[in-house]
Amino acid sequence: MRESLLVFCLICISLSVFSQNLKYLDYDILSNGDTIFSDDLNEILVFDFNNDDEKRYYILLKRKVKKVFPYALKAKEILSEIEDSSLQIKRKRKRRKFIRKKVNQIKKNYEESLKKLTMSEGRILVKLIYRETSLTTYNIVKSYRGRFNAFFWQTMAKLWNNDLKTIYDPSAVREDYLIENIINEEKLYLQKSF
């Protein structure tokens, strides 16, 4: 008797708790009397790794993307600033002088920190710059510093197993797909933290 009273009390309490939570949920009643509960939830991406090496690779990739993504965003900002400002300058000579001055500022501000990047971080940075600007790094150097500089830096990049002409294509390249997911995950995290 005692146990049945206890079970009855537990059922009553759980029903009252459930009914109190029910008013916060969205639900639809179908024509046949069924009730469907719905709620807007954030998308959760689940990766299934085949082995520990893949998981380790993803964790390292995430660390590298977090490190170089701010540089890609800054590159996008600087490039749009240079474009806007150089369009207002009419004379070609003054425009070249302005661009040279801006390049020297960029070197002064970022050269030391960019030298500390590893080769794989540099490769990821080249892809992320393409992602943010829709221009390859080679084309950016070519348009603002000339063909010779672009050729020189492409040759240097090739010596270090990089390619300034690399594009970013998450639909075709697995590493790019993982990078895109890492960026989207971090954006969601940053949105929740504010």
Image (spheres, rainbow, N blue to C red):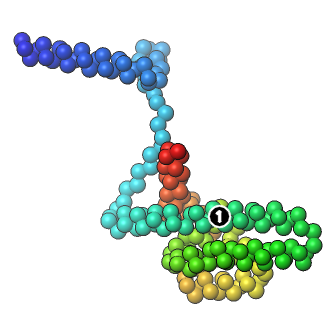
Count numbered badges in the picture: 1
Q: Residue at x 82, y 73 (%)?
A: 98
Which quadrant does the N terminus fall into? top left
Position in image of residue 3 (x %, y %): 9, 17
Residue type, label 1: Lys
Position in image of residue 48 (x %, y %): 37, 56
The image quadrant that residue 159 belongs to is: bottom right
Q: Residue at x 77, y 82 (%)?
A: 147
Circle 1 sits on which residue? 74
- Res. 32 in view: yes
Which sits in the foreground, 161 or 89? Answer: 89
Left or right: 49, with 87 as reference point: left
Left or right: 6, with 108 as reference point: left
Left or right: 133, with 58 as reference point: right
* Circle 1 SS class: helix
Q: Residue at x 44, y 14 (%)?
A: 32
Residue most extreme to the right = 91
The image quadrant that residue 22 belongs to is: top left
Position in image of residue 105 (x %, y %): 71, 74
